[in-house]
Amino acid sequence: MERDERGQGRIMDWLKKLPVAGPWIARLMTTHAWRSYERLDRVKWSRLAAAMTFTSFVALFPLLSLAAAVAAATLNKQQQDKLQDKLAEQIPGISDQLNIQGLVDNAGTVGVISALLLLFTGMGWIEATRGCLRAVWELPDEDENPVLHRAKDAGVLVGLGGALLITVGISTVASALVGWIIRTIGLAQGGVGGVLLYVAAFAVAVLADFLLLLYVLTLLPGVQPERRRLVVAALIGAVGFELLKLLLSGYIQGVAAKSMYGAFGVPVALLLWINFTAKLVLFCASWTATGSKAQELGEPGDADVTDGSGGGPGPAAATSG
């Protein structure tokens, strides 16, 4: 490991000496973003993202099944057809395999089984994600009673699910409102007014993601980052998440469902999207965990996060929950 670090150090020293790009690279290496990346590299973030991707992918299917069962049981025939058309537009390839009528006939059974599976896989996702975020903070695993630990995971899962429903609701209402305003006023879809309204809807979705990330970056790993860094990290994550959603939707519609992979195109695209999202969340966590340059060097007078005792900065610039 030391040999690799020395090799990377020599490469970076060489890059700094390049005629034109060297000064820019040297300046980049002093930024908070670069030091956040260095923390991620130190804690092996590719492995952490892989663990988060696997547990997220496993928990995704009971979540989708539960959502489909609830929708099938509560929506009327016209709304069910509209939902299927919307799914066909957003996720071609998977939606064609859905049997809406079968879901309607067995909504209760499917819902109960999906809820139980989601509780089991969801608590596993909570535990894995918490461990990965705490690893970014370089904090040890929490030592708790196993029963209390599971109960805590269930509570966090319910809280996160509620927060997710709120954010999805806000984003959905904003998108529907934009469409209604465009139809009511008679704005052209590609006109300036229509573009401005879509930008407004994007901003509302970013706000919803921002609030969700505040929950994920603090309560989930049990840390108390400095407020300014938390706000910046959550904003970066919210904008990045919405851009990833647009990328996924465009890729699935234009490439994945029509590629040579056939039925595997959409699941592969989902796996890649989940992995990118996990890395984005890890980067946001690293942004909140990384102190200022002076703080990391242990210089006094620049400690904006304490270890909870009123003194200087803690080992990871946070308090463990």
Image (cartoon, rainbow, N blue to C red):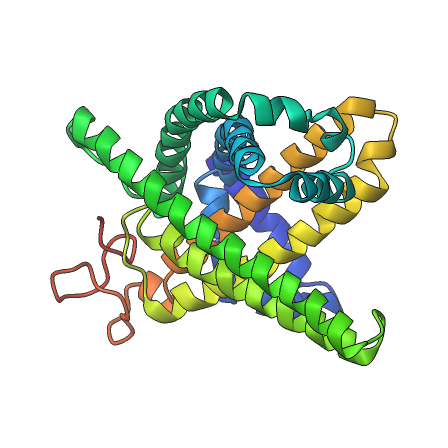
**Above or below for 38 versus 44:** below
Q: Residue at x 29, y 74 (%)?
A: 302
Residue at 50 percent across and 61 percent down: it is 208
Q: Relative to 37, does residue 264 appear above or below in the rendering?
A: above
Q: How many marks?
A: 0
Residue placed most toward the observer, 310 or 29: 310
Who's the residue at 85% across and 74% down the image? 188
297, above or below 71, in the image: below
| 244 displayed left or right of 6 | right
Q: Is residue 143 visible?
A: yes
Q: Position of residue 156 (x, y in %)?
A: 31, 42
Residues 146 and 197: in front is: 197
| 46 sits to left or right of 249 | left
State whether residue 34 appears in this view.
no
Pick the residue in front: 122 or 82: 82
- Quarter of image, res 277: top right
- Residue 83, how many percent across, how many down? 68, 42
Q: Position of residue 171 (x, y in %)?
A: 57, 59
- Residue 22 figure quarter: bottom right
**At which x and y percent is residue 96?**
77, 29
Note whether 38 is above or below 170 in the view shown.
above
